[in-house]
């Protein structure tokens, strides 16, 4: 079940709420000498002294230390080998450390369930704001997002593809993803759903992001496999439901657009288009091609952490840009975490990322703690979708998801 509401019993509850909320606020940023600074970093910087004062200590997860050390060492080795030294690496690595420090403060003195329920409470708050914006637009035609310059929105007639406080719907979908998938898992496994779950799921679906639909497909595969294995008698009930949902999706314009473009690219892999192809699908295909070409040219070695943009700039001239765009998305993200890690940290880092995901997935049930299993499943499905369609390191709670995912596995082993 979802959290029982935000309980402000101590200062840490307040600090954790605002620290988690800041991850949702990628739509709010400011510029200093043409350098963009997201409000997330400023909020976290302001919160850290309060954390230090209240907690007196910080508990770093061993995974955090290992991952930061590996990223730093790999990047330095690659730059030394190629004798190419990029200052962008230092800045981005400092930002990564900054984010992981904040995440470590959130986890200090907490269990996986307590941290996850704090995260759920923030999801409920932001989902309510997003749905309010959608309802106002539906009935009045007024799009509040237009008055916030950092937020990109989608309009489908009277339907608004909501972005919450995030820069775009895909970013918001990423932030909500584990919470939304957790709600779906609880619905299938326990047959229950609460009002808070409906809020989160509604806001998640109304992002209209292909990332959201991809993650829902992944979680359906996981939950259906488990249900059909343990309760084969529900097959006559489940199949009509799946068929109805599929029929509804295929009759929506935004789903058909993404599906048709994806099938077209898969069938002929034509990257020489300048017509009105769905930009997210086309950008993913182009960044995939860039990654493959770079890996072949560099024997599977990386460029260095945070330096995908330099590879993008080197290879992008080989690809057409649709005539309705000045640039293609992906310069700073590769539009996929797997693609970005492959270019920046090398092929073996990508293999480790896959191993990390599979090895920390809880396949069975945990004695007397099924909730921990469901949290793990939700994070597993979320990471798969993020690997395929979201290449951001710092925002969208992705570092938080990684630590929570491995912590859920480790805590489950202690309960056995």
Image: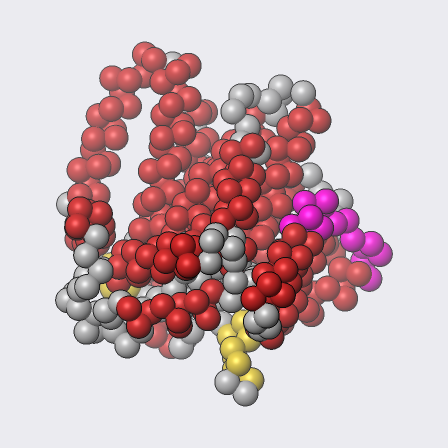
Residue 252 visible (yes or no): no
Asked which colour scheme the image uses, the reply is secondary structure
Q: Start and end of the magenta stretch?
A: 53-68
Residue 314 visible (yes or no): yes
Q: What residue do we see at 61% from left, 35% from top? A: 408
Can you name the residue that lies furthest to the right here? 56
Residue closer to the observer: 154 or 229: 229
Residue 57 part of the magenta-drawn span = yes
Residue 86 in the image, given as x and y percentages of width and height: 58, 73
Residue closer to the observer: 88 or 107: 88
Residue 414 part of the magenta-drawn span = no
User: Relative to 146, is 23 on the left or the right?
Assistant: right
Residue 123 in the image, given as x and y percentages of width and height: 50, 51
- The quarter of the picture where the C terminus appears is top right
Q: What residue do we see at 81% from left, 58% from top? A: 54
User: Relative to 38, is 202 on the left or the right?
Assistant: left
Residue 150 in the image, given as x and y percentages of width and height: 42, 74
Q: What residue do we see at 44% from left, 42% from top? A: 384
Q: What residue do we see at 70% from left, 58% from top? A: 101
Above-or-below relation of 11 to 110: below
Above-or-below relation of 333 to 34: above
Can you name the residue that lies furthest to the bottom here? 33
Magenta span: predominant SS is: helix
- Quadrant location of residue 240? top left
- Quadrant location of residue 5? top right
- Quadrant location of residue 213? top left
Q: How many marks?
A: 0
Residue 46 in the image, given as x and y percentages of width and height: 69, 70
User: Relative to 4, is 102 on the left or the right?
Assistant: right
Residue closer to the observer: 319 or 145: 319
């Amino acid at each position: 079940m979802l959290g029982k509401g935000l309980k402000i019993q101590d200062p840490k509850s307040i600090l954790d709420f605002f620290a988690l909320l800041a991850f949702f606020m990628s739509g709010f940023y400011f510029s200093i000498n043409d350098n963009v600074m997201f409000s997330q970093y400023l909020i976290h910087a302001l919160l850290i002294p309060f954390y230090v004062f209240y907690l007196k200590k910080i508990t770093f997860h061993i995974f955090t230390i290992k991952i930061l050390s590996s990223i730093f060492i790999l990047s330095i080795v690659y730059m030394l080998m190629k004798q190419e030294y990029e200052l962008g690496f230092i800045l981005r690595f400092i930002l990564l450390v900054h984010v992981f420090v904040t995440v470590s403060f959130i986890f200090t003195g907490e269990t996986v369930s307590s941290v996850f329920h704090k995260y759920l409470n923030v999801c409920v708050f932001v989902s309510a704001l997003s749905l309010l914006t959608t309802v106002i637009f539906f009935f009045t035609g007024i799009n509040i997002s237009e008055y916030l310059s950092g937020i990109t929105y989608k309009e489908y007639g009277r339907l608004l593809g909501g972005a919450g406080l995030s820069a775009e719907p895909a970013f918001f979908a990423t932030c909500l993803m584990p919470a939304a998938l957790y709600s779906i898992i609880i619905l299938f496994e326990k047959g229950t759903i609460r009002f808070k779950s409906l809020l989160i799921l509604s806001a998640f679906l109304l992002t209209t992001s292909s990332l959201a639909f991809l993650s829902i497909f992944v979680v359906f595969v996981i939950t259906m496999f488990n249900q059909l294995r343990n309760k084969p008698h529900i097959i006559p009930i489940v199949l009509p439901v799946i068929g109805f949902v599929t029929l509804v999706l295929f009759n929506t314009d935004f789903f058909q657009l993404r599906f048709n473009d994806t099938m077209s690219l898969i069938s002929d892999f034509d990257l020489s288009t300048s017509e009105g192809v769905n930009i997210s699908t086309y950008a993913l295909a182009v960044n995939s091609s860039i990654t493959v070409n770079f890996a072949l040219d560099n024997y599977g070695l990386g460029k260095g952490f945070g330096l995908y943009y330099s590879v993008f700039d080197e290879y992008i001239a080989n690809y057409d840009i649709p005539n309705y765009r000045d640039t293609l998305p992906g310069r700073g993200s590769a539009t996929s975490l797997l693609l970005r890690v492959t270019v920046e940290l090398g092929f073996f880092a990508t293999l480790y990322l896959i191993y990390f995901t599979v090895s920390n997935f809880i396949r069975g049930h945990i004695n007397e703690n099924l909730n921990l299993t469901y949290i793990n499943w939700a994070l597993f499905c979320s990471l798969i979708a993020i690997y395929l369609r979201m290449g951001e390191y710092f925002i969208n709670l992705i570092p938080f998801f990684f630590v929570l995912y491995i912590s859920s596995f480790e805590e489950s082993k202690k309960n056995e």
